[in-house]
Amino acid sequence: MIGVKTLDDADVKGKRVLVRVDLNVPTENGRVTDRTRIERVLPTIREIADAGGRVILLAHFGRPKGGRSEKDSLKPIAAAVAEDLGRPVAFAEDCVGEPAERAVAAMKDGDVLLLENTRFHPEEEKNDPGFAQKLASLGDLYVNDAFSAAHRAHASTEGVAHLLPSYAGRTMEAELDALSKGLENPQHPVVAIVGGAKVSTKIDLLENLVARVDALVIGGGMANTFLHAIDIGVGKSLCERDLAPTAQRILDRAKETGCAILLPVDAVVSAEFKAGAPHHAYGIDAIPSDGMILDVGSQSVDRINAAIDDARTVVWNGPLGAFEIAPFDQGTVAAARHAAERTKAGKLVSVAGGGDTVAALNHAGVAEAFSYVSTAGGAFLEWLEGKKLPGVEALKTGR
Ligand code: 3PG
Ligand code: MG
């Protein structure tokens, strides 16, 4: 169904297995503040190690631009992985050359090793064939478990897949399966819920969605641009006025494809962007000229929830309001909880991902209840745009 080989097809016993993972986790003063991405790759590591494979982890961290830097070292992350894995994780000071070769040569079956940040070498992001070859020489097999880095055509995400027998890890497999159920082969009706601040970052995504889904809910700051495009005054709200023609084009396209568009019918408005700021709800054609729209109103939430009730599949990206400051989180929280309930009741497949979305669903306390929540940011957006992801394509066409 997902069109790639998985660990089911791999014989890892006694083999050196290069496993590309995404350990690009948020940190503060060297401490990991959200371990989700680490937790997601543990099943693949355990499975390979338990089957007698030698697990060599390849990963990037931050954007060091091809040079070494203390702050982008993966060394502290090796300790965090070891902690969560409950087993030792060795570390090599470089991902290629003598330090890497020595560390790999010292491994026994079932051992786990993390190599230093692949992005310390400029050849990584250039997908340099010679560098990919150096990485490949460290392993017998390649497993990619980093969907969230699969939109990058880098040596460790793409190049190596052509040089070694290649497989999707368990998290990659789950991600591809969930995304297939969400948009490629979904059960209709499909409702997409798209929020976030700006239309400008999501034009391709919206154009792809109106061609594929049955209804599109538009919320967050980006809804204001659409409202402005259809001559609704949005006061001092965030609004990309120059993108009105783009918004109009998307609305026209939705008419052609028969995709229902749900824009807010009411809004929670305040004079300032501040937690607890005084606020009022207004009908969408009565937004005060000195006010700022900070959330969808309760009638809008009712309409969104009704659309969720009619749907068999929901794809969600981006919050519906300024969810990071109370009480402007209420629209997002209410709709997210509703989608979670429908999912728990077995009525809905719900797939969410991208940037703030995971934080918003965690805030609503419902991330666990969704069918699948992707930890991918850019890769999830590119997938919603209908683009092919190089890291995934390489698994399909690679060795
Ligand atoms: C991410 O954090 O989204 C991935 O790890 C990819 O990182 P990048 O955006 O720096 O390529
Ligand atoms: Mg990123």
Image (tube, rainbow, N blue to C red):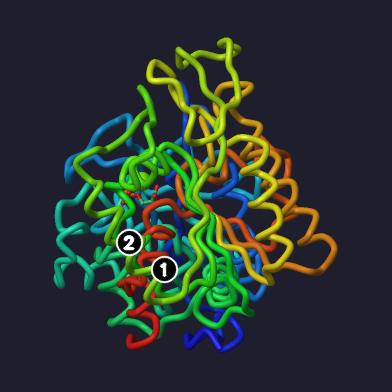
Q: Tell me whether the residue at label 2 lies in contact with that at label 1, contact meaning CB atoms closer than 8 angstroms.
A: yes
The answer to whether 221 appears left or right of 374 in the picture is left
Circle 1 packing at 10 Å, graded few (<14), some (14-19), many (20+), is many
The answer to whether 88 appears left or right of 227 in the picture is right
The answer to whether 151 appears left or right of 340 in the picture is left
Image position, residue 263 (x, y; %): 49, 49
What residue do we see at 24% from left, 38% from top?
241
Mark 2 lies on a secondary structure that is helix
Circle 2 packing at 10 Å, graded few (<14), some (14-19), many (20+), is many
Q: The disc labelled 1 sits on which kind of residue? A: Val
The earlier-in-sequence mark between 2 and 1 is 1
Q: The disc labelled 2 sits on which kind of residue? A: Ile
Image position, residue 381 (x, y; %): 39, 58
Residue 293 in sight here: yes
* Mark seen at residue 210: 1
What residue do we see at 46% from left, 13% from top?
271
Image position, residue 41 (x, y; %): 57, 58
> On screen, 118 above or below 174?
above
* Mark seen at residue 250: 2
Image position, residue 29 (x, y; %): 45, 21
Position of the N terminus by quadrant: bottom right
What residue do we see at 42% from left, 63% from top?
20
- Name the quadrant containing residue 332: top right
Q: Nearer the viewer, residue 335 or 228?
A: 228
- Name the quadrant containing residue 237: top left
Q: Nearer the viewer, residue 69 or 3?
A: 3
What residue do we see at 52% from left, 84% from top?
2
> On screen, 319 above or below 30?
below
